[in-house]
Each structure stands twice: as C-alpha cells, then as structure tokens.
Amino acid sequence: MPQTVESKQETAVMPPLKLSRVLHARRETVFRAWCAAEHVERWFAPETYTVPEAKIEPRIGGAFELTMRSPAGEEHSIRGSFVEFVPDTRLVIDMNVADSAGWPLFKAFTEIDLADTLGGTQMNVTQTYTLVDPSKAWMIQGAPQGWASTLDKLEKEVVRMQGGAETGVRSVVHAMFSLERKYDAPVARVWAAFTDEAAKAKWFGSQVAKLEILERHMDVRPGGRERLKGRWEGGTVSTFDAVYHDVIAQERLVYSYEMHQGDKKISVSLATVQLSFNDGKTTVKVTEQGAFLDGYDDAGSREHGTGHLLDALGHSLAE
C-alpha cells in the first residue's frame, strides 16, 4: 500500500514563497475561483498541466483535493483542507503533495489574502513548504515559475467567470458608473486631497499594504499629467497614467487615464470629479466611463474599487 503523507517523517522546512497578482475582478469572483471544483480544475496547475478532477468543500475543515497531470501523463495528488475561511478576504489551506504512487513529497501551507485595489483585486499568496522527500527539492525550487503560469491561468479564469473573452482576444467592453460621497470638511481641503500630491498620497495608493511606490508625480492643470506606478510584493507592476483636460478650482476635474498591469494596457477611462459645499459638508460626485480592453470585462470591479478609494479619502480627511 502506498505510504501516506502523514506517515513519513518531515525532513526540512524551506523558505516561504511569496507571490502577488492584481486580478481584474471583484474579490468575490477571485475568492469563488479558489472555492469551487469547476473553477479550480480550469486553473490550478502550471501551463501545459491539467487538473482532471478536484474536490473542493468551501468551509473550515472542508476538503481541498485534486489531481494534477503532466503532459506526459504523470500525476501528482494534492490532499488538503481549509484551516481558515474568511469569505472574500482570506483562505488558508494545508496541502499535502504526493506522487502517483501515493508517496509523500512535500507539504505546502498556503495563505491567500485578498484586498480591493486599483484595477480590481490584489491577491497575495504565501506558501510555506515542508520537504518530505529530499530528492524532490527541485520541485519546490521551480515553484516560482510554476506559480507564474498558474496565476496566468487564474487571470483568464476570473475573466471567463465574468463573461469576458480570454486574454489575447481583441475586445472592448464599456461601462459607466457614478458615485457620491459627503465629507465633513471644507471644500478647499477636499479639493487639496485631489490636487495636492502630498495630500493625495494619503489615500490614493499609499494606504495599500505591500505596494512599493516606484513613481508618483502629478501636475493638476489642463494638459498636466499624473502618474502612479507601484510594484506588488510578488513583482507585478501596476500603473495609473492620467492627463487632465479641465480644471476649475474647488469645482471640477475632468481627466482621462490608462491602467496597465505590467506591459498590458487593461483599460482607458474618462473621469469627472465634481465638488459642491452645502450645510457645512462637501459633496463629491465621481463619474467614470471606461473601455476595458482585450478580455477585461469589468463586471463592476472598477466601481467597487473607486468606492473603496473614496472611503479612504474620507479617512484621510478625518486625520
């Protein structure tokens, strides 16, 4: 009978692997992609590998089990369970990996954290390995490359889940939304939060954990530009690149902006910010019209993320 993972002595704990990816989808969609067999079978394996079967029970103690098959037909099994389960926010899965004969190879304690961010959902994955079979250390050493292509497949899957085409197919999806917030602050201070670089840095980008700011500058005038570029912990680079078209002090901003993930342009948008002051409060109305490109069906994620940013603006004004 094949030896089980639990019956073989663990021999070494390897350094944890940390990955980060911005996915153009709502947190609920990304979370669901981890929690249903029909989705896991589509993406939870490196490029050229397949998942012929999976059993996923989305609850604490529930199973996270699947078979991963190589192009040559070699199979590895993952037998694990959920040890933390916070809907749309955090998952922790204790995985045991074995070969086709059931011989244990390594354990992978996997933590997944999801947060709203510009462009969709920031996903951070930390995987801590315990090596069981020392001769298989090469498998763990190759994990960064394997995970990179696996997350590419996850990116395609969340796009598919939202009704979009796969990445690489030329397409444009249009969306429009309007959001309104009232702040207990004078209009001059709220205007500064949108137009002064130091004030805007308190709520636009810098409040996001695990984002290294690579570039930030702004010049708020007709024809002026604003750019925010940051690298997530796993290496993904996001870029917000805007140009201002209309600036009326303490009343209105109109600008267009592009969003990039790495070298990939994912959207082009036109945004209008309107300010008014009544009864001691400042009302801000944000309206956006977006063109989401080449498979990136927005499905409301930009509206959700913008609402999160406007809440962060409110917190900055209360400081």
Image (cartoon, rainbow, N blue to C red):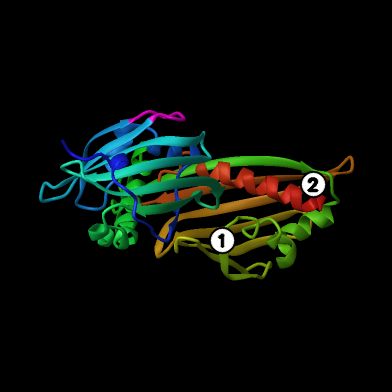
Residue found at x 26% / y 54%: 133
Which residue matches tag 2? 276
Q: Residue at x 38, y 53 (%)?
A: 129
Q: Residue 134 at x, y = what percent?
A: 27, 59
Whether residue 98 is in magenta: the answer is no
What residue is disc 1 on? 211
Please tell me whether mark 1 sits on a helix, a strand or a loop: strand
Give how far across and how far down residue 270 sits, in percent. 55, 53
Q: Rounded to the nearest whole Å, what is the CA distance between mark 2 and mark 1?
A: 33 Å
List x then y, in percent, for residue 108: 37, 48
Q: Residues within 10 Å of mark 1 (few under 14, many from 20)?
A: many
Q: Amino acid at mark 1?
A: Leu
Is residue 253 rendered to the left or right of residue 210? right
Magenta-span inclusion, residue 57: yes
| Foreground pick, 77 / 282 | 77
Query: Residue 222 location, x and y as percent?
Result: 65, 67
Snapshot quadrant of residue 263: bottom left
Residue displayed at 13% across by 50% down: 71
